[in-house]
Image (cartoon, rainbow, N blue to C red):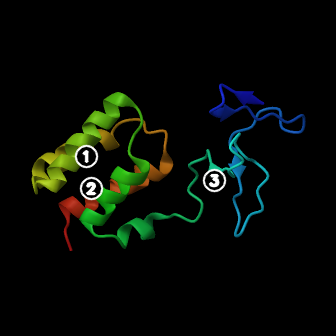
C-alpha cells in the first residue's frame, strides 16, 4: 500500500467506491500508521463536508474574519475561480469594497463545487453590501 514512500493507497473490499478517508478522526485516537522512521501519522481527513457548519456561523464572523477564514480554509481550488477570489480578498484587505463586491458577485454566479464555500461567499457579499 506504500507508494513512493510519501503516500499510501487505501483499499477495502467492503468499500468499492470510497468518497473520503479519515484516519485518527476522534478524540484521543489510537493510531497504527507509522512512517519508516517509526513516527506516527498525524490524524487527517480527505473530505470537506459541512459537518456542523451552517450560515449562522459565517454570519457571526466579522467581514475580515470571514474573508480570512475563506482564505485559510476553503478558498477555491479551480485556478480561474481562485484568481477571482484573490481579487476579492485583495479588495477587502485594501478596503476597496466596490471591487471586492463586484468580483464576489462574479464568483457567486459561477458553478461552485464546494457548498460550504458558496454559503460563505454569499454571507461575505451580504457583509460587504450591508455592513452592520
Task: Find numbered disc 1 in the image and state the secondary structure of the residue it sits on.
Answer: helix
Q: Nearer the viewer, residue 131 or 3?
A: 3
Q: Are marks 2 and 1 in contact (CB under 8 Å)?
A: yes
In x, y percent, where is residue 61? 34, 70
Image point 29% across, 57% down: which residue?
67
Q: Are marks 1 and 3 in contact (CB under 8 Å)?
A: no
Who comes first in sequence, dot 2 or dot 3? 3
Q: Is residue 48 above or below residue 28?
A: above
User: How many residues crowd mark 3 within 10 Å: few (<14), some (14–19), many (20+)?
Assistant: few
State the separation of the CA atoms marked 2 and 1.
Answer: 7 Å
Where is residue 108, by image quadrant?
Answer: top left
Who comes first in sequence, dot 2 or dot 1? 1
Quadrant in the picture for the N terminus: top right
Image point 20% across, 60% down: which residue?
128
Closer to the observer: label 2 or label 3? 3
Task: Find numbered disc 3 in the image and state the secondary structure of the residue it sits on.
Answer: loop
In x, y percent, where is residue 124? 29, 58
Residue linked to disc 3: 42
Residue linked to disc 1: 104
Image point 15% across, 49% down: which residue?
91
Q: Is residue 47 left or right of residue 127?
A: right
Residue linked to disc 2: 125
Instruction: Single out the residue that lies furthest toward the top.
Output: 4
State the separation of the CA atoms marked 1 and 3.
Answer: 35 Å
Image point 56% across, 56% down: which residue?
50
In x, y percent, where is residue 113? 49, 39
Q: Nearer the viewer, residue 69 or 84?
A: 69
Amino acid at each position: 500500500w506504500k507508494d513512493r514512500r510519501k503516500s499510501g493507497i487505501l483499499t477495502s473490499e467492503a468499500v468499492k467506491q470510497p468518497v473520503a478517508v479519515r484516519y485518527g478522526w476522534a478524540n484521543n485516537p489510537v493510531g497504527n500508521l507509522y512512517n519508516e522512521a517509526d513516527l506516527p501519522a498525524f490524524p487527517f481527513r480527505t473530505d470537506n463536508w459541512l459537518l456542523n457548519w451552517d450560515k449562522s456561523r459565517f454570519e457571526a464572523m466579522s467581514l475580515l474574519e470571514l474573508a480570512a477564514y475563506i482564505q485559510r480554509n476553503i478558498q477555491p481550488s479551480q485556478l480561474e475561480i481562485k484568481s477571482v477570489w484573490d481579487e476579492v480578498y485583495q479588495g477587502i484587505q485594501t478596503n476597496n469594497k466596490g471591487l471586492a463586491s463586484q468580483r464576489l458577485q462574479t464568483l457567486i454566479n459561477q458553478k461552485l463545487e464546494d457548498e460550504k464555500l458558496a454559503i460563505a461567499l454569499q454571507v461575505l457579499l451580504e457583509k460587504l453590501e450591508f455592513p452592520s
